[in-house]
């Protein structure tokens, strides 16, 4: 939380100074090429732990050539800023929410659909299947970057300062922060709330100052980002499972030799594996801390009324972009294979 508060108070100036230092201080006499990776989570977040494993692996295998540097906590700016830095090659990789990528390639809209994945198992199996992800991950190559692996970001749920959200009607008249994506804005419109798109780093102060009445995210936002200090009602309506993506600059990736690329690919698998392994424990710890220390109450509303309102968005997307139909069908096959039970993941 401290990092995010820090970032909120000194955003632009801090980022510019840091960025100039980082991009101009290229390691002095060092011959090694610096591989810069930015993300917006805290240092003890599973995403940072996954990237640390990647750093160790690359430096163990290719340490004479590459020096991996990780910049957590929005030190290099918001996700949108970091995507742009990755596009131009100012940095080599960053972690971006699938939501934000929707504005770079329409294909990413698919994974942002509310109630797309029927269970956590179906979500993981689908995201692990190259037939589901490959074309979409490569769909931004013309924009200068591509996704190299995905990271679990759990399920997204509403949490609020005032009353709990137990049905869509409770959202009426509330200003809820959403990520900057047309799908999320449309979802909130359908559910009856008022969508307030903004970057992750701005959410804490916006909640505190009353600019917004609530937000939606996974449990770690309560603790790691401090939102549970202000929001005491967290409702498991489970409206989305939105992956994060590790994206890389294409010129950097294409410039790797075949052997280097294989080692990097192994590293990408490692990020996914370590992050996912750490995720379950981190969610459990966040729930415990939110409930015992921050006094957050967890609610388990009937998900069906939320789902019914949102599901027509699936058809609308497939009518607009029929090429996504076969990937969508494959995801539905995973949903049929791994049917979740009511209580799963909450
Ligand atoms: C999650 C997700 C981040 C995203 C954030 C948000 O924490 O992992 O990638 O930035 O939600 O709501 O903006």
Image (cartoon, rainbow, N blue to C red):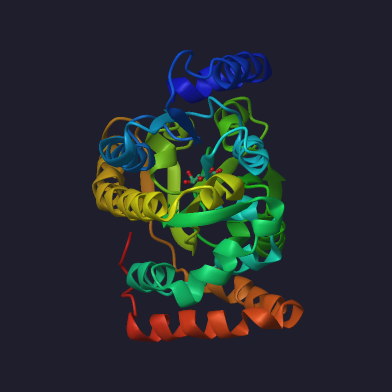
Quadrant (top left, top right, bottom left, bottom right) of the C terminus: bottom left
Write the residue at 23% across / 47% down: 281
Write the residue at 38% across / 60% down: 300
Quadrant (top left, top right, bottom left, bottom right) of the N terminus: top left
The picture quadrant where one finds residue 13 is: top right
Q: Position of residue 295 (x, y in %)?
A: 34, 34
| Count of marks, rendered view | 0
Q: Position of residue 176 (x, y in %)?
A: 63, 46
The picture quadrant where one finds residue 225 is: top left
Question: Taking the image as drawn, is residue 296 in sight?
Answer: yes
Write the residue at 62% across / 13% down: 17
Question: Vertically, is 208 above or below 333?
Answer: above
In screen coordinates, is 340 left or right of 173? left
Q: Position of residue 65 (x, y in %)?
A: 39, 33
In the current view of this chain or complex, which residue is farthest to the right? Answer: 320
In screen coordinates, is 230 left or right of 102? left
Q: Position of residue 236 (x, y in %)?
A: 42, 57
Question: Vertically, is 264 above or below 300?
Answer: above
In screen coordinates, is 80 left or right of 345? right
Q: Nearer the viewer, residue 277 or 206?
A: 277
Write the residue at 51% across / 69% down: 134
Question: Vertically, is 319 above or below 202?
Answer: below
Q: Nearer the viewer, residue 234 or 104?
A: 104
Question: Taking the image as drawn, is residue 71 in sight?
Answer: no
């Amino acid at each position: 939380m401290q990092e995010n508060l820090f970032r909120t108070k000194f955003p632009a100036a801090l980022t510019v100074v840091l960025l100039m230092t980082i991009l101009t201080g290229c390691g002095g006499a060092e011959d090694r090429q610096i591989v810069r990776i930015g993300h917006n989570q805290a240092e003890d977040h599973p995403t940072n732990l996954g990237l640390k494993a990647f750093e160790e692996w690359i430096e163990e295998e290719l340490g004479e050539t590459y020096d991996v540097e990780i910049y957590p906590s929005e030190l290099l700016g918001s996700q949108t800023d970091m995507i742009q830095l990755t596009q131009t090659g100012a940095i080599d990789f960053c972690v971006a929410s699938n939501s934000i990528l929707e504005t770079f390639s329409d294909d990413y809209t698919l994974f942002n659909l509310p109630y797309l994945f029927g269970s956590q198992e179906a979500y993981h199996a689908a995201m692990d299947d190259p037939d589901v992800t490959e074309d979409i991950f490569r769909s931004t190559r013309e924009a200068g970057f591509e996704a190299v692996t995905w990271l679990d970001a759990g399920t997204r749920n509403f949490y609020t300062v005032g009353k709990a959200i137990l049905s869509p009607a409770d959202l009426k008249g509330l200003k809820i922060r959403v990520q900057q994506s047309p799908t999320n804005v449309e979802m909130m419109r359908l559910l009856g709330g008022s969508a307030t798109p903004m970057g992750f780093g701005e959410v804490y102060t916006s909640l505190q100052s009353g600019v917004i009445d609530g937000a939606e995210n996974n449990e770690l936002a309560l603790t790691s980002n401090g939102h549970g200090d202000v929001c005491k009602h967290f409702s498991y309506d489970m409206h989305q499972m939105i992956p994060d993506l590790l994206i890389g600059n294409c010129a950097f990736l294409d410039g790797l030799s075949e052997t280097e690329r294989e080692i990097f690919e192994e590293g990408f698998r490692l990020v996914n594996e370590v992050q996912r392994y750490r995720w379950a424990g981190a969610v459990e710890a966040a729930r415990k801390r939110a409930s015992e220390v921050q006094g957050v109450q967890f609610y388990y509303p009937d998900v069906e009324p939320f789902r019914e309102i949102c599901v027509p968005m699936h058809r609308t997307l497939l009518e607009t972009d029929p090429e996504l139909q076969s990937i969508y069908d494959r995801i539905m096959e995973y949903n049929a294979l791994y049917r979740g039970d009511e209580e799963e993941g909450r």
